[in-house]
Image (tube, rainbow, N blue to C red):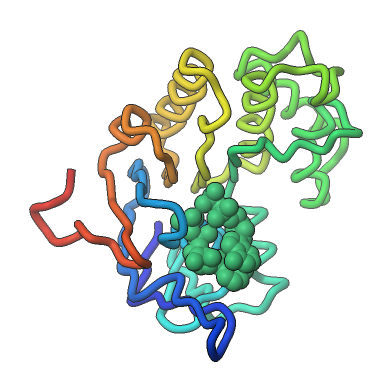
């Protein structure tokens, strides 16, 4: 699902140059659940942004579902993002002026499908995450855990093969966080590939593999050292 070879990402130049990634190699198979840990500033968000087709590497190669995304133009990257990838962020990133069901529908509206079909699929997903009684509520009328459940439903609207999470439980209490993790585990058992960045060791240990980044490099991906 993901093949990254010797990824390098530099920001800035001269005395403001930062090497955010310093030669990342990563191979994630379809159906795997991988979590990534590391100190602040080590390159986790940069790596997720590249996997999510939001940024391009300075050097190196990255294939998502066998497509070499380092070679694609922005239009094609937006299409790959829409069709193959679902994101869940620490801060939920719901649109405040839209209610829950409208938020869930939005990514599929961009895919140009029939409105009625989109609404049906969105309400099915909201039911799946236990939010069927809150479909018409706006984000500020929902708790953090409820907003994150809406965000999980939204990430699934286009039926992505790959789910990317950046601290998806970071703002949740441990009970709500466990509920969100249970949902992710179930999605993984159904065959979806999951890559999560998390500080939480309990969350990380739900993954098949835990990888550690330091200064833009994995420090543990030699064979035999994988968890
Ligand atoms: P993490 O997610 O592990 O905290 P990031 O990937 O956000 O780390 O950042 C890695 C390094 O790259 C940091 O030193 C950060 O300041 C720098 N960085 C990230 N994004 C940018 C950017 N858009 N412009 C300049 N520097 C950046
Ligand atoms: P996290 O809490 O996930 O580690 P950060 O706060 O490091 O995230 O970064 C959030 C976003 O801000 C990143 O996706 C990155 O693109 C951007 N960013 C991080 N550091 C910098 C920087 N020094 N300059 C510009 N943008 C940055």
Quadrant location of the C terminus? top left
Q: Is residue 50 above or below residue 135?
A: below
Q: Is residue 143 above or below residue 83?
A: above
Report the residue that reaches farthest toward the left. Answer: 224
Q: Residue at x 40, y 81 (%)?
A: 60
Q: Quadrant of residue 115?
A: top right
**Pick the front one: 174 or 108:** 174
Report the residue that reaches farthest toward the top. Answer: 133
Does 177 sit left or right of 154 as displayed? Answer: left
Q: How far across and how far down the image is residue 71, in percent? A: 54, 82
Residue 149 shows in this picture: yes
Q: Residue at x 49, y 23 (%)?
A: 183
Q: Quadrant of residue 222?
A: bottom left
**Pick the front one: 101 or 138:** 138
Quadrant location of the N terminus? bottom left
Q: How far across and how far down the image is residue 4, in percent? A: 37, 69
Does 19 sit left or right of 226 as displayed? Answer: right
């Amino acid at each position: 699902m993901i093949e990254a070879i010797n990824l390098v990402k530099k920001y800035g130049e001269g005395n403001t140059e930062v090497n955010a990634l310093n030669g990342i190699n990563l191979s994630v198979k379809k159906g795997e659940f991988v979590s990534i840990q590391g100190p602040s500033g080590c390159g986790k968000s940069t790596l997720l942004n590249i996997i999510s087709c939001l940024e391009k590497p300075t050097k190196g190669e990255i294939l998502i579902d066998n497509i070499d995304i380092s070679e694609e133009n922005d239009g094609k990257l937006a299409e790959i993002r829409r069709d193959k990838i679902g994101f869940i962020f620490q801060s939920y990133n719901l649109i405040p002026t839209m209610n829950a069901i409208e938020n869930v529908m939005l990514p599929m509206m961009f895919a140009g499908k029939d409105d009625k079909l989109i609404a049906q699929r969105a309400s099915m997903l909201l039911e799946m995450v236990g939010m069927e009684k809150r479909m018409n509520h706006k984000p500020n009328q929902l708790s953090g855990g409820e907003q994150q459940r809406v965000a999980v439903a939204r990430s699934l609207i286009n039926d992505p093969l790959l789910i990317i999470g950046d601290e998806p439980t970071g703002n949740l209490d441990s009970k709500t966080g466990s509920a969100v993790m249970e949902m992710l585990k179930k999605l993984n058992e159904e065959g979806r590939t999951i890559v999560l960045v998390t500080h939480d060791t309990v969350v990380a240990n739900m993954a098949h593999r835990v990888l550690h980044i330091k200064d833009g490099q994995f420090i543990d991906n030699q064979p035999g050292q994988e968890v």
